[in-house]
Image (tube, rainbow, N blue to C red):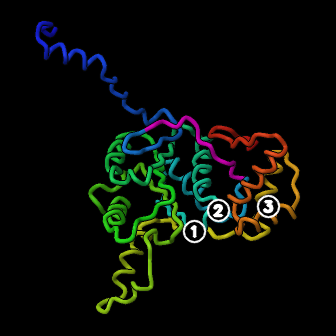
Amino acid sequence: MNDQGDPLARIADALERIAPAPAPPIDWLAAPAYVWDGAARVVARIAAPHLDLLQGITAQKDLVTANVARLAAGHAAHDMLLWGSRGMGKSALLRASVAAAQRTDPAALALVQVAPEALASLATLFAQLGAVDRRFLVFIDDLGFEEGDSTGPRALRSWLEGGVEARPGNVRLAITSNRRAIVPRHLSEQDDPINPRDAVDDRLALADRFGLSIGFHNCTQDDYLAIIAGYCDTFGLAWDQAEALEWSKRRGARSGRVAWQFVTELAGRAGRPLDLPIAGQTDPS
């Protein structure tokens, strides 16, 4: 016990009493998903559409779900880059694929979403995950690097393969981006008078590290209407095709996101909630 006559001891005791208790260590076996922003937070449920509701991306869906299932089973699996048009279900597909794998074995696989600003702490995350007897899909959504940033892309290449801090064997990376090469590219890259391919090859080297690079493109009118039909059938909503097309024209785009916004409007008018299913549910409704 500290000497109560010592002012410094009394101050130390007071500080100990008011200091917050240290956070308990994270249990990497307990939850279906986590968020990493330099420290881990548990996510109790994965909100994701049922795979059957993801229309217009059949080929992409087959590739992603098969790869995630392999990872969950402990088989060889690829790191994935999902790139292309906004609102076409890239991140939704990743969440839905993990949720589907967890319905078979909830303990086999967990999703870890990393905030883009937390990339510098990925090595710390990998050190923790590598010590756990579980597989993890580390997910970075909408990744992009600023013009002139060479540190971030080089670190990511090292994590994917070849570096001393490469991701452990029980971890795979899944990244979504609006650009195939992730980093910005310009016509001026061709202007290097010494070797016009060097700058381009260095930038493309990052995308080439992913075993699966899957493109997502703007959906056709038929795909857009099929997405709406799938949601409306699931949630029991009446809809009009002409109004759905007018909705997309006013927004200047056809995508899964625009379709979902239209369905949200229909549900709001009908006084209905729209709740996405969660991991562990087998019925999309």
Q: Residues within 10 Å of mark 2 (few under 14, many from 20)?
A: many
Describe the element under mark 2 as helix, strand or loop. Answer: loop
Q: Residues within 10 Å of mark 3 (few under 14, many from 20)?
A: some
Q: Is residue 50 magenta?
A: yes
Residue type at mark 2 is Met
Which residue is situated farthest in the front direction here? 7
Tag 1 and tag 2, C-beta contact below 8 Å = yes
For mark 2, what is the residue?
Answer: 88
Question: Is 260 drawn above or below residue 180 in the view shown?
Answer: above
Q: CA distance from mark 2 to mark 3?
A: 13 Å
x and y percentages locating residue 185 in the rendered image: 44, 77
Residue type at mark 1 is Gly
Question: Is 284 drawn above or below residue 83 in the view shown?
Answer: above
Q: CA distance from mark 3 to mark 1?
A: 20 Å
**Which residue lies at the image location 47% right of the left edge and 46% below the top edge?**
112
Describe the element under mark 1 as helix, strand or loop. Answer: strand
User: Looking at the figure, which quarter contains the C terminus?
Assistant: top right
Describe the element under mark 3 as helix, strand or loop. Answer: helix
**Which residue lies at the image location 68% right of the left edge and 38% below the top edge?**
281
For mark 1, what is the residue?
Answer: 84
**Which residue lies at the image location 41% right of the left edge and 39% below the top edge?**
40
Which of marks 3 and 2 precedes in the sequence? 2
Q: Which residues are magenta?
A: 41-52
User: Looking at the figure, which quarter contains the N terminus?
Assistant: top left
The disc placed on residue 226 is 3
